[in-house]
Image: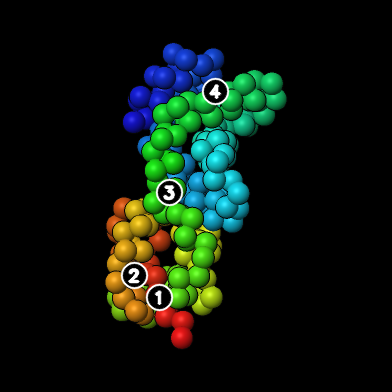
Amino acid sequence: MKNIIRRILQEETKIPISIRRRFNGDKVLGFMKTNAIKKLSSSPGLRSSIIDVAALETAKEVLPWYDENGEDYAEDDYQMWLKSVVEYLIQKYGKEIKEYVDKVLPQSAYNRDGANYVFIKHSERGGGGAGFSEGGNFTWADLMGKRGWWFPINWWEVKEKLDIKDSGMVTFLKPGDEHNKFGYYFSIKKNKID
């Protein structure tokens, strides 16, 4: 993936090689997913422009604004490169991001569904030990906006496991799993509203 992005950026843009060399293509799709979920969960009105928003936020994350000597790039150059990267990200990942967003945050995710959700980071297998929990009165969209954007995973699969329970907990990442560099377990707890 990294080599493909470098090649395309080299062939289709005027971005200097010193910048392309630092462009980490391995994480770009994950950044697009997390940026889309973070922005959309807090602003449902962005749905029609979420691909553009996610591409811009991702481009800002992966495109350095200073050179190898720590000197800022000229603003005009930086803006031109930023625009090129955004256009590339939209073209390359736009369809995939739209499908991802539609699955993770369907319109119904913003509504109360008879349950509240709690995000749990825990050091022990059953939910205990060090860590924290956050939630209590969260809709699915609230949960995704607060912590779900941390991980570019298939959140709809976690939601499907929770949907078959009246109440209960689903652990979705264990220490050492892909996307989990924290060394903790991560779970979602569903509490039925009476």
Q: Cβ–Cβ below 8 Å for labels 1 and 2? A: yes
Tell which of 119 and 66 is nearer to you: 119
Mark 1, other Cα within 10 Å: few <14 / some 14–19 / many ≥20: many
| Structure colour scheme | rainbow
135 relative to 153 in the view: left or right = right
Residue 102 badge: 3
| Mark 4: secondary structure | helix
Separation of residues labelled 3 and 2 (CA atoms): 18 Å
| Amino acid type of the residue tagged 1 in the rendering | Lys
Residue 173 badge: none
Q: Residue at x 42, y 79 (%)?
A: 191
Tell which of 47 and 146 is nearer to you: 47
Residue at the disc numbered 1: 190
Separation of residues labelled 1 and 3 (CA atoms): 21 Å
| Mark 1: secondary structure | strand
| Mark 3: secondary structure | helix
